[in-house]
Amino acid sequence: MAIQISSSLLFSSLLPLFFFFSSLENSHASQPTRKDPEINHLHLLHLNSLLPSSSCTSSTQDSKRKGSLEVVHKYGPCSQQNHDETKVTHSDILNLDKERVKYIHSRISKNLGGGGESVKELDSATLPAKSGSLIGSGNYFVVVGLGTPKRDLSLIFDTGSDLTWTQCQPCARSCYKQQDVIFDPSKSSSYSNISCTSPVCTQLSSATGNDPGCSSSTKACIYGIQYGDQSFSIGYFSRERLTVTATDVIDNFLFGCGQNNQGLFGGSAGLIGLGRHPISFVQQTTSKYGKIFSYCLPSTSSSTGYLTFGAANSRRLVYTSLSSTSRSSSFYELDIAAITVAGVKLSLTPSLFSTGGVIIDSGTVITRLPPTAYAALRSAFRQGMSKYPPAPELSLLDTCYDLSEYKVISIPKISFVFGGPATVELQAQGILYVASIKQVCLAFAPNGDDSDVTIFGNVQQRTLEVVYDVGGGRIGFGAGGCK
């Protein structure tokens, strides 16, 4: 079938101090016994456990059950993507993370204020000039099949987005470089466009923050979505057969068939939206998976995790309810009751987190806290890390250490107490961001204001099994989901 699209579619811009184990930290001596109560508030670990290896290691957990996909970090050795063209540094990842947070803040502000912008036809000179821009940063992808016969595509999964989309032939305006063969709808017997007059077309406004357009020649519904770093995708809103696993097939799945796309997107073919909106994957697959999915993000980029659709079978989970104060139809909102560092609860007012709200997001790398909460957490953490020499700041991370002279280190444990209460202890890999052994940083950052939304990011979620029971209105956390 012939694919036509206007040549210039684009929409407008949218702890107190504690004892350390010096002999341990400078040798390969055995770990202290649990008899010392101080150890209960410390993570003691070999430094090399924080560093990725040069080869890929699969998760040892049982993630091969029905409806389960392997999760791979797009910049690690488990990824088959070709990154030779653009080398992404830690500063790049963190700077792009800033842009994603700005995007989330603007999305929530727009939802509160109402109104979206329309997809417009603009001169090509107005296209973003960032040829190396990435969607969000530090994201993870899975492989699914699209079309009949199916074509395997590597898609970034994102709980902060609703629309699933991929690049499509003939790339009427622009396609960025991806690892997989670009999907060609003309070669699929199950593909169809959605018309401009379809009620489904109007759902794009709330899902993308932009009103849909209409092709003058085919009267097909046109979507447009732009992300915080100015990367974007524009094309036909369509239906297609989606193959999740060999036995799980979704017919008439709503997705975006992108004809005008810019951004490197880590070499992936697009994005799978796991938000709460009616056009998200979660809502479209209700009859099959019951609005439940779970994932585990690996400890380093050289390991794999999993993304599973359907009920979780873990007995280790603690649940917290989704917030009753919803600021967005897309994001998953939680309530934070307290934060502890080295077993001591930070002195924070109860209303601090409720003012701006809290979301959990798989696409944001670094957890963003109200400045007041961050200052308290940083102070307590620095007290606990006073033994170690400081290192220069790294982008938005202002508390870093040079650990090159140590083989074993001790760091204060950090726990989040969500509403319920549900206490979630972060693993060491969920506390630190490691650029190198000479620059190991506290993986938290402050928002601009206490009224900004708090974001529980993906570093903090590492190795945890995170279960989204959307139908039950709750999110579960379990330790040891993957390695």
Image (cartoon, grey):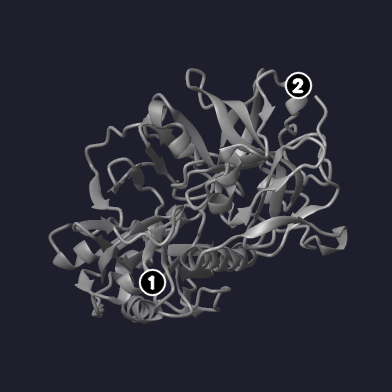
Vertical relation: 422 (above or below) 79: below
Position of residue 483 measured from the top left corner of the image (x, y, whole percent): 40, 44
- Number of marks in picture: 2
Vertical relation: 287 (above or below) 101: above
Position of residue 198 measured from the top left corner of the image (x, y, whole percent): 61, 37
Q: Decide if residue 57 is in sight here.
A: no
What amino acid type is highlighted by mark number 1? Answer: Gly
Position of residue 324 measured from the top left corner of the image (x, y, whole percent): 29, 58
Secondary structure, mark 2, is helix
How dense is the environment of label 1, judged by Cα within 10 Å: few (below 14), some, or many (20 and up)? some
Position of residue 458 measured from the top left corner of the image (x, y, whole percent): 45, 55
Observer-nearest of 181 and 430: 181
Q: Decide if residue 455 is in sight here.
A: yes
Instruction: Give left or right: position of 470 versus 247.
Output: left
Residue 356, label in figure: 1
What amino acid type is highlighted by mark number 2? Answer: Lys
Residue 170, label in figure: none
The image quadrant of residue 148 is: top right
Say which label, 2 or 1, has the lower sequence index.
2
Q: Residues under labels 2 and 1: Cα distance? A: 47 Å
The image quadrant of residue 455 is: bottom left
Observer-nearest of 183 and 434: 183
> Looking at the rendering, in which quadrant would you find the N terminus?
top right
Q: Say whether marks 2 and 1 touch (CB < 8 Å).
A: no
Q: Residue at x 77, y 42 (%)?
A: 215
The image quadrant of residue 29 is: bottom left
Observer-nearest of 430 and 261: 261
Vertical relation: 417 (above or below) 248: below
Secondary structure, mark 1, is helix
Q: Residue at x 32, y 32 (%)?
A: 311
How dense is the environment of label 2, judged by Cα within 10 Å: few (below 14), some, or many (20 and up)? some
Residue 187, label in figure: 2
